[in-house]
Image: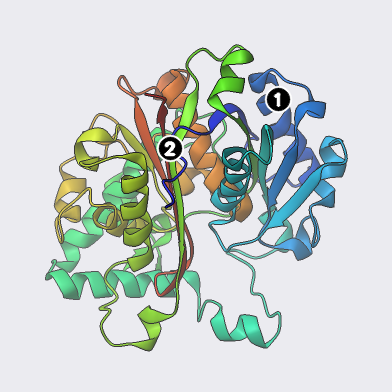
Amino acid sequence: MAKGIKDKVAILGMGCAKFGERWNDSPDTLMVEAYEECLADAGIETSQIDAAWLAVAFDAVNVGPSGIPLSMALRLNDIGVTKVENYCASGTDALRGAVYAVASGAADIALAMGCEKLKDTGYGGLPVRTRGTSFDMIGIVGSAPGSFAQLASAYTAAHGVDAGDLKRAMAHVSVKSHANGVKNPKAHLRKAIDMDTVLNAPMIAEPLGLFDCCGVSDGAACAIVTTPEIARELGKADPVTIKAIQLCASNGWEMQFGEWDGSSVPNTRLAAARAYAEAGIRDPRAELDLIEVHDCFSITELVIMEDLGLSDAGRAPADILDGRYDRDGAIPCQLDGGLKCFGHPVGATGLRMVYEVYNQLQGRAGERQRATADFGLTHNLGGSPYNSVAAVAILGRQN
């Protein structure tokens, strides 16, 4: 019977390019920027990497339909490179591939890279894609802001939350993340905002205003993983290990039956429950020291707090306004600024989240450093509330 991969895989090194409007830089440039930091952190040579995974969601404007561009950009040693595309959860899925390769014994050292050049598409949000009957049938219906605005409306109805209170809680999410992003030199948007600015901003899709929506940017992030034993042999005395990594893809239940009320993301709940079980976490509210979640919209972060079991049903708005997820709160959320400040270069996002948790656990997050950082969680959501791929990873020290 499967027992999971807890403590079977260690992170040897990580790197992250600066996110932003990188008009003059190619995907190769971004990947090399992230890789050089990652390789230096790992303390190995490129020739020691046995296998690699590349996450890119929009191949038409990025690297094409294979993993070859990663192999060429990094001059990998003619190893197997797999391209991963799984909606906005692609980055975490690439890490999952590398982690599973090491855990299974198929590779001693593996690489995961996520990269995206969204600014080159010319769109203000995610590009519209029409790739045949299959994608039209199962893809996102309507716009991303419209889909997540429906999540907000459903949440309000399901829990009887005052619409004004919900908007203030959503505004607090954005204000909190922007305050954190100011302290991060790799973030795209590094400007503090206040509640009035958020609440009085132009409406995008009721109740989501301009500052409730994440931006569009270019970026890349990278991880090199190995076994804890090899990590220690290479000088990492107390390596950060993967406690759990779980991915849950929708089977269509949300849209095909009448039981779902639209106020939560069922896949996140399932992925989280499986990840907690795999990591041996019984009380996430007490055991998690920080989290990075998929805040594509402020309402998404709010709902995720309940889907992860960190707030009781209907209590997330109050917990948010009380500062539970602030920098100095019980469980800081988005200490690096999140999608709100990094934007969402799709293939890179999941690995960017892991990069922040990894640095926090290493005690090298600079101004953003959390005093206590033993366990951290990342949550990466692809698709929409009703047709999603949810990925949850938990990191910590081996024990």
Quadrant showing the C terminus: top left
For residue 235, side relative to residue 200 (left or right): right
x 43%, y 37%: residue: 6
Amino acid at dot 1? Leu
Q: Residue, x 24% and y 56% (percent of image)? A: 306
Which of pointers 2 and 1 indicates the residue nearer the eye?
A: 2
- Residue 46 on image: x %, y %: 79, 28
Q: Is residue 261 above or below residue 95?
A: below
Identified at 47% across, 41% down, the residue is 5
The span from disc 2 to disc 1 (Cα, nearest Å) is 24 Å
- Residue drawn at (75%, 36%), measured in percent from left and top? 50
- Residue bearing mark 2: 6
Return the residue at label 1.
39
- Callouts 2 and 1 close, C-beta under 8 Å: no
Left or right for 97, reference 377:
right
Q: Secondary structure at mark 2?
A: loop
Q: Nearer the viewer, residue 292 or 368?
A: 292
Question: Camera-side residue: 32 or 249?
Answer: 249
Q: Earlier in the sequence, mark 2 or mark 1?
A: 2
Q: Position of residue 121 (x, y in %)?
A: 71, 62
Above or below, comparing residue 70 to residue 183 in the picture:
below
| Amino acid type at mark 2 | Lys
Q: Residue 315's spot in the image, x, y percent?
A: 14, 55
Q: Residue furthest front?
A: 1
**Can residue 291 be seen here?**
yes
Q: Quadrant of residue 71?
A: top right
Judge whether residue 26 can be spotted in this image.
no
Q: Residues within 10 Å of mark 2 (few under 14, many from 20)?
A: many
The residue tagged with tag 1: helix, strand or loop?
helix
